[in-house]
Amino acid sequence: MEWHVSDAQSLAIIDREIGEHMFSPAEYEIVRRVIYATADFEYKSLLRFSNQALQAGAAALAARTTIVVDVPMVQVGIAPHIQNTFANPVYCSMEAIVRPQKEKTRASWGIETLAQRYMEGIFVVGQAQTALTSLVELIEAEVIRPALVIGTPSGFVGVDAAKARLNDSMIPNIRVDGRKGSAVVAVAIVNGLVDLAWQAYGQENQRMV
């Protein structure tokens, strides 16, 4: 990501207001990216990282693992950064060709369809709670085993349970606890993770090209 003076000033404000914290350097980079994107310091206490989530995500990005997202806003938000670095394929559940089904939303049915094609992919659910629920059900049924799941949808009915089930699944994940969340948060997490992965693996990938 190309940073400008105003970005640096904003990040300095975030650093000053957050002060001491218990995050690892890599986790903190993700946290400050989310706060920068949302201007909401509450995310400091809401973002959760499972054990080895960042390491697993970075390795999967470097391996050019397919990324599946729930809504076009996430796809549009991450695609330029992905294409300028690891060039992973990015697919959106809303664009998957599926047969109509009354029992499920388009995002839910689409992500389920794509998940069964890319069983070990990186999954980013930024907006559609129904898509996260479907994804968790596939994980619990051991149909898929994602490299990483990023879950940040907001909601009032069942979103807490879906996020808790994601954590219990033992799949590497980055999530927002509680009702809050958005596609903007998901994009900030992915782009921050891409930058971290590029620092760790970028030169190696360039040599392989």
Image (tube, rainbow, N blue to C red):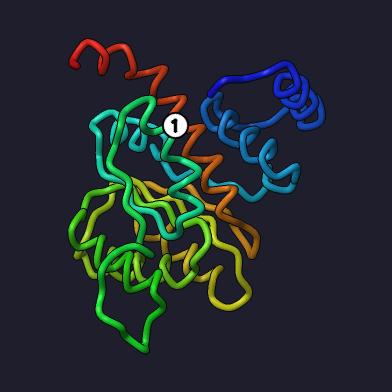
- The type of residue carrying mark 1 is His
Q: Residue at x 22, y 50 (%)?
A: 120
Up/down of 186 relative to 15, above or below: below
State the image coordinates of residue 69 (x, y, percent, origin top left): 39, 54
Q: Is residue 202 left or right of residue 1?
A: left
Q: Could you tell me which secondary element the residue under label 1 belongs to?
A: helix
State the image coordinates of residue 33 (x, y, percent, origin top left): 62, 34
Q: Residue at x 48, y 50 (%)?
A: 74
Q: Viewer-proximal residue, 102 or 12?
A: 102
State the image coordinates of residue 134 (x, y, percent, origin top left): 36, 71
* Mark count: 1
Up/down of 126 relative to 197, above or below: below
- The residue beneath circle 1 is 81
Q: Residue at x 24, y 67 (%)?
A: 113
Q: Residue at x 26, y 48 (%)?
A: 121
Q: Quadrant of the C terminus?
A: top left
State the image coordinates of residue 17 (x, y, percent, origin top left): 81, 30
Q: Is residue 73 left or right of residue 204?
A: right
Residue 23 found in image quarter: top right
Q: Viewer-proximal residue, 7 or 62?
A: 7
Q: Viewer-proximal residue, 159 or 125?
A: 125
Q: Is residue 127 left or right of residue 59?
A: right
Label 1, residues with CA under 10 Å away: few <14, some 14-19, many ≥20 = some
